[in-house]
Image (cartoon, helix red, strand yellow):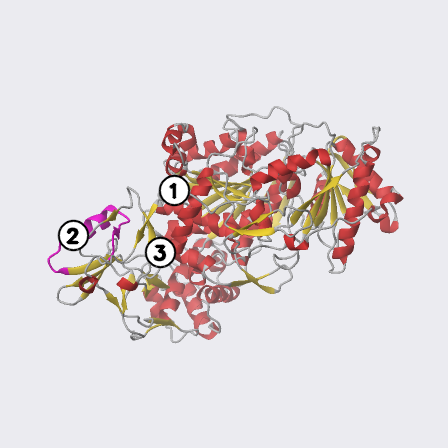
Amino acid sequence: MTSPIINLSALEPLYLPHEMPTHHRVRAKKEGEPAEKVKGRRPSEIQIAQNLRRCVTEWRETDYAGASDTTRELLHHWFGRDHAIKNNEGEVIPFKYYFCQQEAIETFIYLRELRGLDTLSGIVSEFGGENSEIAALGIDPQEDQWSKYAFKVATGAGKTKIMSLAVVWSYFHSLRESYSPMARHFVVVAPNITVFERLKEDFGDGIIFDKDPLIPVAWRGDWNLSVVLQDEATGAATGGTLYLTNIHRLYDTNKRKWKKESETYDWMGPAVSKAKALDTGEELRERITSHKRLMVINDEAHHVWDPDSAWNEAINYLNDTIRKRGGDGICAHLDFSATPKDNKGNIFKHVICDAPLGEAVDAGIVKSPIIGRGENLVEQTSDDASIKYQQHLMIGYSRWLRSKEEWEKSGKKALLFVMTEDTEDASQIANKLNTDPLYKELNGKTINLHTNLKGSLKKRGKGENVYYEFVENEKEISDDDLKELRKLSRELDSNKSPYLCIVSVLMLREGWDVRNVTTIVPLRPYSSKANILPEQTLGRGLRRMTPPGQAAEVVTVVEHKAFVSLYKNQLSQEGLPIEVVDVDKVPKTTVTIYPDQTKDLKKLDILIPPLSAGYKRSPTLGELTIDDVKKAFSRFSSLPLGEVRKTEIDYEGRHLFTNEIIEKMKVQLPLLQSGIGAVSFYREELERQTSLRGTHQILASLILTFLEEILFEQKVSIYDEKLISRLSDADVREHIRATFVPLIQSKTTFIEERIKQADAVSVCTWKPFQVTHSENRPTLPAENTPFNLVPCNREFEVAMATFLNRAPDVQAFCKNAGPQSLRIDYLSGSGRLSFYTPDFMIKKKDGNYVLLETKGREGKTSTFR
């Protein structure tokens, strides 16, 4: 068999993953010629997403004009600077969010905060294109019960990162912005246990919020989010909460009953029936619906296309129950999928962002797919799938051998993935690959994974050829076998795992994040009418083994020529066709703000002197006294001490159905031996939150005195068992943080004299910038402004602009907006260094200047100079 000829230049990324897509690829007219690179981003076939792209781009280019301070600071932190994180090997590596991740969260924030569009009908009316107003009228009111936004993100492009960005933005927006409609409580929903286990790797214990640069260092003290897994619904948490659950745990048992006790979850689900899962989910549903406001995030959301599905009933149950209890319900519902389509292939109406597979390939985020056509593939006449598809398997095996040779020198193993149509075929093929010398390199190194597991895990082979085979029978899979299968699946990429080939049924379409797949062999009869989307097949092998830009990775799909047209037709919708497209053409919904040369700009000019910073943060903590601590705590109330907790509790295990007592035991509760360890813990936590080091001599004694004499209603020794019982409680931890963090920040921040650093800058030299123009955000003409228009974000600003244009003592004024607007550093009430952007700049006729804030409130909330 001859090796295929691949044009390597066509496999190299056209741009960096964190850059906006600027080119697309066009196939050469003659085979073998290099691909042509043509300027212009591929347009999206999703009208709303396409129209939103330009608006979001212009908003980004204006430095997020009109955004709240919280939003702007987070966006700058995420995307305006370089980051470094530790990889799985503990190495510190540079990190930047992909552009598709940036565009997704920007689009969500743009619609929600800037435009205030929280209904599907409103979004369709604004961005639906031709006849959008008519289309908006056709939206079913049921679809507008709460805000829904869908994100079409290619497999491997990092949906989980976008979810985490949305969680952090909503949390801090709710915390820091007055009248924020956002939530501090979240439900991340998985369609099955496979996806749940993948999401748990990121969200379990809040790992992603610690590992990724999601939270500005100065804001760490305000971050208080507890992660609750579906089987851990008991207990209470302060601050915000993120619930991670399988959808089945959210079903309302009063509306939908599962009659078959034997009906179980999909691939590698828990060894319990759906009916039992509903019972165990009651406490979880009760806790989730106790919150006033909720954000729901659906992963692999192509399952929710049917409004009458149990999935949608479950989400509707959460919304209705919260509202019946006096809450606001679901403030935002985010759907994520690489294929957000209904059963007829129609894209979801509420898709607002399109990050297609073509752009992910061009940016090098995922592997470049190659369709390996089998010109002379023939199905043998046999009931044994391993014989029937022998030619397919041999071609796939040969291709995999070449990739194995290519990667093994770098210490990475290549995996072969065989997709079958039913479990019987999977068992026959797995057995053949494990035993037939024809597939020598796979003997004893092939694992059979598929859905609807019933049976047991058997160890086969001897010596170095030991492998596991799943043997089907009428019995449910045991807990031990289930755990072993999950473990084997998670470790497939690792060199510790002996397996080089995976055989599975076609239903394995999602949640399976093995990165080392280099060859895929989809097996199906040529007459098959199964609606297996090519992007779902490719999704099993798209994830990269190495970071983007490090190597040109490919995944080869071995297909019969009869199915090549299917890939061409389907993937053309994902941005992979090789064709020339024009630059985006979308209707404008913004206006340009610029210095108006038709006016007397000399008279209307406003000068801004560039000044040095007014505050400086010291890396060390100076003098701090117990009186300072008492003063900082004076705004809080003392906590009750309580009684000594039991160190031993009685435990009873009862049968789920009969309620009979099966076991009894005494459980010892571990308590701190003394409070000294707690003092050290809290001191280290305060250092992390304030970015200080070496504070032990100052903080340790203060924390000790604070715990013994100030925090509680009565004075108590650090060795008292009552105090020891309380030291790990959330309210104690929160009071220490709220008392010490602002105090430390105030003691390490110094006021400096602002010095003029350069000649004053005229606003008449500002570059033109875009602002949103709508009924809620009008742009007004005014005689006394040097610009063509005055952009206003609310009615109060409209009234103020009208007043300033008529005020007899005002010579000139302008809205302080755009990328060159005046921003002044200040010390917030919590002690953080922040930046303040006044709303208006005013020059009076007597030559004096005034900075005007239309939404500020008088009070001791910040220090501004």
Q: Is residue 16 left or right of residue 775?
A: right
Which kind of residue does numbered mark 1 sit on?
Pro
State the residue position of label 3. Answer: 69
Disc 3 or disc 2, which is closer to the eye?
2
Q: Secondary structure at mark 1?
A: loop
User: Visible in this render: residue 235?
Assistant: no
Q: Which residue is mark 2?
A: 803
**Figure quadrant of the C terminus:** bottom left
Classed neighbour count for the residue bearing mark 1: other residues with Cα under 10 Å, few (<14), some (14–19), many (≥20): some
Position of residue 306 in the picture relative to residue 662 (left or right): left
Q: Residue at x 71, y 46 (%)?
A: 556
The amino acid pointed to by label 3 is Asp
Residue type, mark 2 in image: Phe
Residue 394 placed where, x, y %? 82, 42
- Disc 1 or 2, which lies upstream in sequence? 1
- On whether residue 799 falls in the magenta region, the answer is yes
Q: For mark 1, what is the residue? A: 587
Residue 847 lies in the magenta stretch:
no
Is 618 situated above or below 148? below
Task: Estimate the x, y position of residue 454 in percent, counting from the top left.
Answer: 73, 33
Q: Position of residue 786 (x, y in %)?
A: 23, 58
The residue lying toward the viewer, choosing from 663 and 208, is 208
Q: Relative to the observer, which residue lies in front, 120 or 488?
A: 120
Foreground: 359 or 799? 359
Question: Residue 273 appears in which quarter of the rendering?
Answer: top right
What residue is at 50 percent from the left and 36 percent from the top? Answer: 285
Lower position in the chain sequence, tag 3 or tag 2: 3
Above or below residue 393? Residue 422 is above
Residue extending farthest to the left is 808
Helix, strand or loop at label 2? It is: helix
